[in-house]
Image: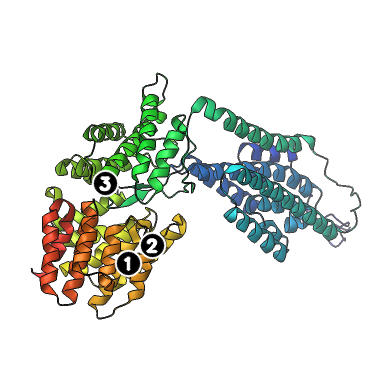
Amino acid sequence: MSLGLNDNPPVGALAPEPRHKSAGLAFGLSLLVPGLGQFYCGKTGRGGMTLSFWLLGLVLCFAHLPTAIVGQALVVMLVLWVFSFLDAYFTAIEINQGQDDVVDVQNPRVAVTLNLLTAGFGYFYLGERTKGITIFVAMQVARWVIPSSGFWGVSISLALLVVQLLVAEDAYRIARRQVKEALGAEPLPTQNAAPASRLPVQVPVVLACLIPLSFIVLVVIGLVLGPKFGKRPAVASGSSRSVSGRAQNGADARRVRNDTPVPVVDFATAVQDVQRVQRKSEGRKDEVGNLKLDVRMLSATLGGKKVDASDAMVAHYYRALALAMINTVHEHEGEPMELPGARTARADLDKIINAGRVLTYVPEVSQSNAEFLAGSITRNQLHDEPAAYSYWEKCASNAHAGCLNVIASARITGDGGQKVDVNEALALHTSVYDTGVKYQCAGAFSAISIAAINYFVGVRRPGDDELEWTKKADGLLDKVEANANKRNVCQRAGIEVREFLFQLSRGHRDDNILQDALSRLDDESVATKAVIQFISGAIDENGLNAAVSSSKFEGYRCSAYFDAMWYSELRGEDAMARRFDQHLVDIGKFHCGQSLVFAKKFKF
């Protein structure tokens, strides 16, 4: 009797049982959590990538970042969410039809998503590398050269959006063709074919259309009604420029390049106008009138009955900044400063500081920036050094680059009762340099300060060299200049004069550096221009004194006399160097404190 042990099994008896996945369940899982439907379908790689990038976008949305980055993160989350539930639904159907392995090689939904998010990487996925590179480069160049605002800026941005949608559609068409070629002729229906999904295909498709459409409608409504009801300025964070000219700081963000004055008609335009003046390298007397209008508008906002907390913080900050810049112009013009305005500015900043954690729609308005600006106003306009350093110590403890710069300088001079500690000054400056251009000029200022400490104080750590540090400062200044599109950004002409003198101290004279510095100056940079002419031999000591004395700002005169003294000492003209040193003494420690410390190297 046969037990059937040697009988050949019927065809298909040992074949694996056909897989079946519920398309409706896959859709629902990814609708709840992007990527979960792909995990259910066994596509763990695709599900993991989708979920990871979606979670990254979620983190960026809740981080304290510029609005532009948060907006991009929202778009990425939206695209990945729609992709996830569509892909999960159709992947389940493809698994049931036994086609998923073929489709996975050139998944049309992946190709579309990549082109939507990157404008070209979907072509790389499909093997169309030439087309991908061409589209990607063209889109990036277009975004770089088009204006950021105005009619043409908006029009071209919309055109680029249409192009991106078209390349997404093109990627879908190519992928579908490749899938069809890979599958060959239509497969014959099998006896064990999986049943169709009970969830109609129209449900995920219609939902995929409605979600982005609703998002666009909400954005348009926000743009139309936002200015009317919110009165919140569409402002971007730039560098917060010290009214003392010591350092610059601020969040790493894009800045509006337009320096054309705008009529001050509401809270938003007042903030934008203050930012416009702030972006200029120096405040000009003809800006005072506009700044006073800004102050009145911001005061009216603060006096309103329905101003919310965020608007109030922004108004306090920019009113303080406007008042500080008005006094800075007075100081540069040799005019008396408006002390009531300085006190009002400090009171505005104290409100921000005492509010604790400040959350506004303008990243520049922060507790640390308020402390830095309050310290500048307190020292330079109210002449209260101990109180000023109490502000700067607080923001330095929070690693604010501008405040670290100030405290590092005080470790050399002992200003404000600070302890003198040269090694700590070097450490603080190095920490600021390590931030690169994140805080605009602060990193470059610290690099040139380290060079000065090495040379004048004679303290060097292993590897320290003043010429190497000037090269590092140049590298950072090149980056800041490229971003700011401004030749004398960070008062670079003055830094180049110091670079020339450092090289001359090693026996190398490079007059090209002086010529480059001179080309950066405008007609109002009298003191810096005079010292360059003096070093170049175009004017003598009397000519230098006449030009520098015409400068109404003691800080500029101090820098010019210090450079002239240094140059005279290098040439062995000790009597002339001593006369320039006496000018520093006459101006006084308040403006020339660090220069007087460095001048001790020459033992006058």
Type of amino acid under label 2:
Arg
Quarter residue 530 falls in = bottom left
How far is the residue under mark 1 from the one under mark 2?
10 Å
* Tag of residue 333: 3
Q: Position of residue 365 (x, y in %)?
A: 37, 39
Residue 201: x and y in percent read: 79, 38
Q: For this view, does 525 lie left or right of residue 52?
A: left
Q: Residues within 10 Å of mark 1 (few under 14, many from 20)?
A: many
Residue identified by numbered label 2: 520
Position of residue 210 measured from the top left corner of the image (x, y, whole percent): 71, 34
Q: Residue at x 26, y 46 (%)?
A: 333
Tell me which amino acid carries mark 3: Glu
First in sequence, mark 2 or 3: give its number.
Answer: 3
Residue nearest the observer in this picture, 152 or 58 = 152
Describe the element under mark 2 as helix, strand or loop: loop
Disc number placed over residue 521 in the picture, else none: none
Q: Amino acid at mark 1?
A: Glu
Label 3: which secondary element? loop
Q: Is residue 348 depicted above or below 180 in this figure?
A: above
Of labels 3 and 1, the one closer to you = 3
Q: Which of labels 2 and 3 is toward the front?
A: 3
Query: Depth-wise, is mark 1 or mark 2 nearer the camera?
Result: 2
Direction from residue 208 to residue 18 in the image, left or right: right
| Contact, mark 1 vs mark 2 (Cβ under 8 Å) | yes
Q: CA distance from mark 3 to mark 1?
A: 25 Å
* Front-lying residue, 278 or 111: 278
Q: Residues within 10 Å of mark 2 (few under 14, many from 20)?
A: some
Residue for badge 1: 496
x then y, percent, for residue 95? 76, 49
